Amino acid sequence: MAAMSWPRRVLPLLALAAIGAPAVAATTDLAVTCDTTLAPALRKAAAAYRSRSGVRVFVFATGPGLIVPQLVRNIQNDIVVTQTAILDQAVQAGVVGSPVRAQWGNKLVVAGLHDTAPIDRVFAAADPSMASDIDGPTVLARLGIRPTLTMGAVDTDEVAFLLTTGMAQAGLLHMTDVRANDGLVVIRPVPADVQAPLLYAASVTRLAGRPDPEGFVTFLAGKDATDILAAAGLEPIT
């Protein structure tokens, strides 16, 4: 299968740095870093938290493989929301504390502009890299899908772009990607024995320098945020 890459954005490292230097407590604003696919859901939760508490929460999307290296380099973040396996790495690196509170699952699906879109023509899938959280070609092989052309992508956010612009008929997305993009629908689910749902959790980082970052993490575990996140594609793990 041929692979094509369509890069269209730069990771927001400068924006993350601009939020503030470590140990700055002159503002109650909070900075959250998260996997790219989680950003739309967390921004909705952040808006609800601001309505309740008055605290603004800035959400920065980052390739999952880059989260721990950023924290190790002291890029300012108060909270991290990422895969539990990556949080385990962050705990071992000494950049986040424990315990981790809320947990959610994010299913992988085959998606397109309509549920009868062909899956054997142009298919978009994320290439394995530090910016991606799945190995698209491997999942395709396990599903037995053999498209005429496979378009490689940086991550599922770019897969969604290829689908919504009509450059691909079908693609591998997380449920959060589908819910975040009007017009995209699930063509078929990916069975758990092919690709298990990714599991996520939230934790306060060792770099937190603003008041009460634990408040937002606690909010994420509550009913209001759980309902918001579930509507955005994240299923609570109990």
Image (spheres, helix red, strand yellow):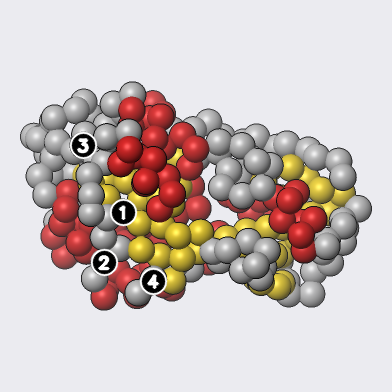
> Disc 1 marks which residue?
202
Task: Indicate which disc, 3 or 2, sits on the residue closer to the N terminus.
Answer: 3
Residue at image position (70%, 37%) is 6
Viewer-proximal residue among 92 and 23: 92
Q: Quadrant of the C terminus?
A: bottom left
Q: Which structural element holds mark 4?
A: strand
> Disc 3 marks which residue?
206
Task: Indicate which disc, 4 or 1, sits on the residue closer to the N terminus.
Answer: 1
Q: For label 4, count other residues whose C-alpha is less than 10 Å away and answer few (under 14), some (14-19) or many (20+).
A: some
Give the image location of residue 10, x and y in percent. Answer: 53, 31
Seen in the image, is 235 located left or right of residue 96? right
Q: Is residue 232 visible?
A: no
Amino acid marked by disc 1:
Ala
Q: For label 1, count other residues whose C-alpha is less than 10 Å away and answer few (under 14), some (14-19) or many (20+).
A: many
Q: For label 3, count other residues whose C-alpha is less than 10 Å away and answer few (under 14), some (14-19) or many (20+).
A: some
Q: Mark 4 and mark 2 in contact (Cβ < 8 Å)? A: no
Calculate the distance from the C-alpha at mark 3 to the C-alpha at mark 4. Answer: 26 Å
Seen in the image, is 194 located left or right of residue 40? right
Amino acid marked by disc 2:
Ala
Give the image location of residue 61, x and y in percent. Answer: 43, 43
Q: Is residue 36 visible?
A: yes
| Numbered circle sitting on residue 221 | 2
Residue at image position (41%, 57%) is 200
> Disc 4 marks which residue?
236
Residue at image position (83%, 61%) is 145
Viewer-proximal residue among 75 and 50: 75
Q: Mark 1 and mark 4 in contact (Cβ < 8 Å)? A: no
Q: Mark 1 and mark 2 in contact (Cβ < 8 Å)? A: yes
Q: Kindly give the residue lying farthest to the front in the view shown.
A: 92
In this rendering, the answer to whether 238 lies above or below 49 is below
Q: Kindly give the residue lying farthest to the right in the view shown.
A: 148
